[in-house]
């Protein structure tokens, strides 16, 4: 917003907001969902909080789409995966959490590679895995 709420030019506020926006990356959170859904949901929320604490903007499709799509219906699960891949295409990085890579995660990681999106790997405690960046 280049003008303040009174309609006057306010380049200082505009530049400050622009600087804040520029330093944040949109990061795709890639972690298991199926299996122990309760624990995996809690972990995904923790991973999102971790990204926010790192001043990034997390995208966590498996927390969002599972609120209204049925994971047990193949067509709806596929729809959720497809929409997640669209969101991934808008991200600067993908952060992969945990040591287990699910089928859905494999698809997301392969798409990130295809799009040359930076991949970072973390354990379930949000500790970077040394040599895990690709």
Image (tube, grey):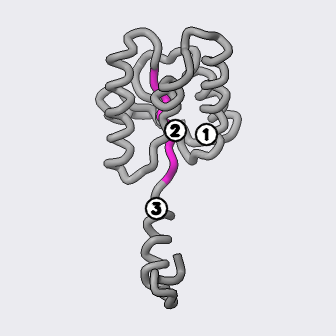
Q: Which mark is residue 28?
A: 2
Q: CA distance from mark 3 to mark 1?
A: 19 Å
Where does the magenta region start and end? 25-32
Q: Residue beneath label 1, please?
A: 87
Instruction: Tell me what residue is drawn at x 29 percent, y 29 percent.
Output: 125
Q: Which residue is outermost to the front?
A: 6
Q: Main secondary structure of the magenta part?
A: strand
Foreground of the two, 14 or 50: 14
Magenta stretch containing residue 49, yes or no? no
* Residue linked to disc 3: 23
Please, which residue is most extreme toward the left here?
Answer: 125
- Residue shown at 61% from the left, 42% from the top: 117
Q: Residues within 10 Å of mark 3 (few under 14, many from 20)?
A: few
Q: Is residue 78 left or right of residue 2?
A: right
Q: Determine whether label 1 and label 2 are within 8 Å by CB.
A: yes
* Residue 31 visible in rendering: yes
Identify the residue shown where x is 61% and y is 39%: 87
Give the crowd class for mark 2: few <14, some 14-19, many >=20 residues within 10 Å. Answer: many
Query: In the picture, which quadrant includes the C terminus?
Result: top right
Badge 1 or badge 2: first in the primary sequence: 2
3 or 1: mark nearer the eye: 1
Is residue 28 located in the magenta-colored stretch of the structure?
yes
C-alpha span from label 1 to label 2: 8 Å
The residue at 66%/37% (across/down) is: 86
Q: Position of residue 14 (x, y in %)?
A: 48, 78
Q: Is residue 107 left or right of residue 36?
A: right
């Amino acid at each position: 917003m280049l003008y303040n709420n009174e309609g006057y030019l306010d380049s200082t506020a505009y530049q400050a907001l622009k600087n804040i926006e520029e330093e944040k990356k949109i990061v795709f959170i890639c972690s298991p969902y199926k299996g122990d859904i309760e624990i995996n949901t809690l972990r995904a929320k923790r991973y999102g909080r971790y990204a926010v604490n790192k001043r990034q903007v997390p995208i966590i499709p498996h927390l969002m789409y599972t609120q209204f799509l049925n994971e047990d219906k193949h067509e709806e699960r596929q729809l959720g995966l497809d929409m997640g891949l669209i969101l991934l295409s808008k991200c600067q990085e993908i952060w992969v959490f945990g040591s287990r890579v699910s089928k859905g995660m494999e698809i997301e990681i392969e798409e990130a590679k295809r799009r040359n999106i930076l991949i970072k790997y973390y354990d379930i405690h949000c500790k970077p895995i040394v040599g895990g960046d690709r």
